[in-house]
Image (tube, grey):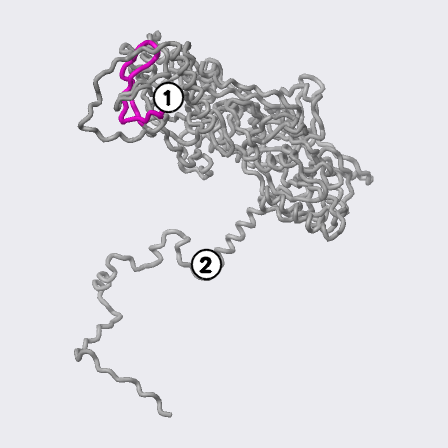
Amino acid sequence: MPSAIAAHSHRPTTKVLPKSYKSRKTTKGALRDQAKGKIPNETSQRKTPHQQVMSKFDRRNQAKQRQLAKHKEHQRETSIFSGRDAAPRIVAVVPLCIDNDVSAAIKSLNGSLDIESEVPESSFRVPVDRFKQKLQYVPVKRDLTACIDAARIADFVVFILSSKVEVDALGELIIRSIENQGMSTLFTVVQNLDKIQPAKARPDVVKSLASFMTHFHPGQEKIYNLDSRQECSNLMRSLCTTTPKGINWRDQRSWMLVDEIRWPSTETESTVLTGIVRGKGLKADRLVHVGDWGTFQIEKITAAPLPTKKRKDDGMVVDQEEAENVLEIPDNDQDDIAELAPEEVTMDDADVEEDMKEPTTKKGVLLDDHHYFSEEEPEVYAAPKKLPKGTSSYQAAWFLDDVSDSESELDDQEMEDVQGDDIPAAPEDGMEGLAHREPTEGAMSEYPQSEMFVEPNEDDDAAQLEAYRARKRDEAEEDKEFPDEIELHPNVLARERLSKYRGLKSLRTSPWNTEEDRAYQPEEWSRLLQISDYQSSRNRSIREALIGGVAPGTRVHVHLRGVPRDLEKSYTPSQPVSLFSLLRHENKKTSLNFDITHKEDFEKSIKGKEELIVQCGPRRFIINPLFSHPGNTENNVHKYCRYLHPGQSAIATFMGPITWGAVPTLFFKRTSSEGEDGEAVVPLQLVATGTARPPSTSRVIAKRVILTGHPYHIHKKVVTIRYMFFNREDVEWFKALPLWTKRGRSGYIKETLGTHGYFKANFDGRINPQDAVGVSLYKRVWPRSAIPFTRPLLEGASGSQDEDMNEDIQ
């Protein structure tokens, strides 16, 4: 078949364009014009090694180098567990159910590798010859304190579940507490699974237990069966070969699980704690915190090698004893045990104290930084200096004034304060929450003709006041429109009851005059640790722990000074005891701030200044915290919160020893041991969790009270207000304060009317007759000091110290 003939078409034009000149040899000028300023060398444009175009050989070499670096890092992390005198892997065995048997669980694990060993109540070591490792078991009972302390110093945590009994409230409390304080690698096992009949129901039980654990730890999909020798062997392999992930705040310090305690026989001798150093190097100059005992100084650190056996010439095996080998002793740089600065050290400037004059009589309330209507009051305010004159070298240790460290390699993200979503400004917060002014009206006057004011009858006025407040009391319970509102008794003078309070034009931007607060600050406030640059001070303290000290993995005797003799009577060998080395300055007291988030499991609100038990790192305290709004403000003033409601977050503030870094924190609250139905419940609940934040003594926590009044007569923008004050003198005293309404209108007091506290006010727009007029007053509240907690957490419920909500108004 002939091929198809292609269709022919004529060109659109007969014009023929000449061919372009193609030459490989172009002049330098043409090349320069063609580049138009660009650099033709492609490799020179790529600045960093990641931008360079590498060959296949270079890419393989880079991958190999990366693999070798990762291998060296892994060897460095596991080198403490390798060798003849290596440190054992600490395994905390935690029971979660009532019928769990810790001793049987450990025997099942050891029996899978044919290891025969007795299981005492205290911690003990077991050599695992198959994997050339050592395991140190820490068996604990179903006690919250023991479980938390064991998990805090463990490389591996093993949770024991039951195949028949569900995890009760105490078991869930143990899980949540260990999870929120920081936990290393976790494994979960189940006991008595073979007793489940029929056998085909066992997989469903394991699946149910795995679903329960993934609710708390999403990565826990594997549940090991202790009745299966193969699964026990697999778990032992994981314990001996897995690299524990560790705990960040723990690994920044030196710590030790105490294996043996030698109590002194005389008062001159020291208490000796024996164990293996972990984490960073243990320094004799730093203070150590031991369990619930407290903080102590180190007298010396001596070597404590395990006894070795040596053969004599005649073949007889004898124990070899070595003389005392002192590894480290403290020098002149040893930290002091004192929590507060000496009494003669204060932050008040000496020149300011000399220039202070006798207080003058005030004629009005303090608004921002000035007493209005008091012309004789000077307006000049001298800010206190950061360091007083004549400070000695010992006293200067309480004033941290480090330079900023902008090249720090440490993680600065933990330093950032909680930003979150900005809380919208309300009318009671000041200028930011007010509505815009209404447009001016040409036909209306802002100053209408005055009307005659009729003084009301006292009996009728009292009856109307009671009816008005009864109606508002119902509205407050339903809508909580004014959580800071207070009601003054008609016979109480507002200027006396609210003498500590001041006004602010704006809660977020108005300056706070600290001179007025000095008369009410706690006695120890001026002796607290002052930190001008937290980031630099923290980085310096953490860097110091990286160098020097007794190397990790060394078995040592730590000789402590000043340990009370009474602790020997209360010591229980079954309770694990840990030793943590504190970083520099971590024993000094200051004003601490913590992020706190209300746990949704606890349905009740937490009252401010209510007694709580806090655990931050290795220490526990009894605190009465102040709650305040998070975030950063221009004037560093934060509103005090009377309650922390479920699901809310805030900043908890109290005075206590500082802890460097973002350390997880637990907040417990003691409750009644009987439930609503008369059933026995756990007398302690985990009500909130948090994280340590930078401390600050300049952070002002302002408690707000709101006085509200009722529009009695409205004439355009001029309103007569009643029920806010009850005498003429109070109106004159608080005359400078700005007024606001719920709907965002702002105004000011124009003049007083009569003697019962009525006054006339001008507003920037018309107000609704159902609107409420308010005025905001603030005073600074001071954090309370923490008390060390030295008892078991579940040792009887102590009565909480309930605080009267109106006590600070007096």
Say which amino acid is labelled 1: Ser
Disc sitting over residue 58 in the figure: 2
Asked whether residue 765 is drawn in magenta, I would say yes
Q: Position of residue 20 (x, y in %)?
A: 22, 73
Q: Quadrant of the N terminus?
A: bottom left
Picture layout, residue 104 above or below residue 397 = below
- Mark sitting earlier along the chain (1/2): 2
- Splitting the image into 4 quarters, where does residue 601 fall? top right
Say which amino acid is labelled 2: Asp
Q: Residue furthest bottom?
A: 1
Q: Is residue 545 left or right of residue 174?
A: left
Q: Quadrant of the C terminus?
A: top left
Please tell me how crowded label 2 is: few (under 14), some (14-19), or many (20+) other residues with Cα within 10 Å. few
* 168 or 746, nearer to the observer: 746
The magenta-colored residue range is 745-772
Q: Is residue 113 visible?
A: no
Q: Position of residue 222 (x, y in %)?
A: 64, 49
SS of the residue under disc 2: helix
Q: Position of residue 444 (x, y in %)?
A: 20, 25
Which of pointers 1 and 2 indicates the residue nearer the eye?
Answer: 1
Q: Give the residue number, with chain letter if any, for mark 1.
A: 776
Residue at position x 56%, y 31% in the image:
687
Residue at position x 72%, y 51% in the image:
201
- Splitting the image into 4 quarters, where does residue 149 fall? top right
Q: Residue furthest left?
A: 15
Q: CA distance from mark 1 to mark 2?
A: 69 Å
Q: Position of residue 754 (x, y in %)?
A: 31, 10
